[in-house]
Amino acid sequence: MSTKFTIPKKPLRDRITNFAQSLLFWRGRRKGMIHTGNITWDNIRVIFFPRTFSERYGYLGAIPWKEDGALFRALEPLVIFMDYKARPSWCPRWVLRFLHLFGSDNSIIRVRNWTLHNLEKRLTKGYSIWDYKTKWTAYDLRISVVGDEQISNLAGDIEKAFYEKGYRESLVEAIKKIQPDFKKNWMNIDSLEEYLEELKNADTAK
């Protein structure tokens, strides 16, 4: 028997819509200094319709978001190789992006849901890029990865090649400050170092 105080039942369609919205815009939680973020429609869009390189491979961790420059060109092969090694051949990327958002809060250190987080790590073997940065100079690249021997070796080779290329360019630049018409850019690093030292000594002796 209904009265004026009876609250009418919401239609099933409305209840399903409200439940879905509660998931999509699930507010983050805070515990001490650790907190999870709010999930937005844009987060959901990234799962199914990624627009950029970083959105497509974001489940791997720290992915360069700016798709130009020396850093991106250096790290791009590593990201693509890690995607090949980490993602099971039968698993679409959107599943891993979904798990990374709802399980790991799009983070390499936070956990939003332990079940989904553990499933993500099981599928990807835990492979990820923790960090990348240049330390002492613009060409001193440091890459922190979790992966097998091939991934570690590739990261090391990229660091070495990035350093050598940047160091060579810095030597040539230093030489051209003393000798502007210098054109022997093909010289190896040891020869460039010796040539620069000779120029400095000759310049000091004047």
Image (tube, rainbow, N blue to C red):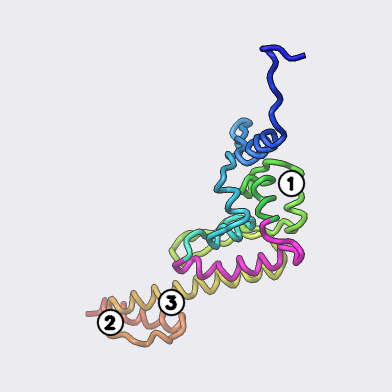
- Say above or below: 88 vs 29: below
Q: Quadrant of the C terminus?
A: bottom left
**Three-letter amino acid code at the position of disc 3:** Arg
Residue depth check, mark 2 versus mark 1: number of the one nearer the observer: 1
Q: Residue at x 70, y 15 (%)?
A: 6
Secondary element at image label 1: helix
SS for callout 3: helix
Query: What secondary structure is marked by label 2?
Result: loop
Which circle marks residue 116 in the picture? Answer: 1
In the image, taking residue 170 as reference, residue 98 lies left or right, namely right
Instruction: Give the label, 3 or 1, closer to the camera.
Output: 1
39 or 13, which is in the foreground? Answer: 13
Give the mark nearest the N terminus, 3 or 1: 1
Q: Within 10 Å of the Cα at label 1, are there few (<14), some (14-19), or many (20+) other Cα atoms?
A: some
Q: Residue furthest left?
A: 206
Queried whether the magenta region covers residue 76, the answer comes back as yes
Q: What's the distance in space between the residues labelled 3 and 2, CA to CA?
A: 16 Å
Residue type marked 1: Leu
What residue do we see at 40% from left, 75% from top?
Answer: 169
The residue at which mark 3 appears reads as 168
Q: Is residue 110 above or below residue 140?
A: above
Residue 21 in which image quadrant: top right
Q: Is residue 2 above or below residue 126?
A: above
The numbered mark at residue 179 is 2
The magenta segment: 68-94
Image coords of residue 47 (percent x, y): 62, 53
Which residue is at a point 46% across and 69% down the rendered structure image? 70
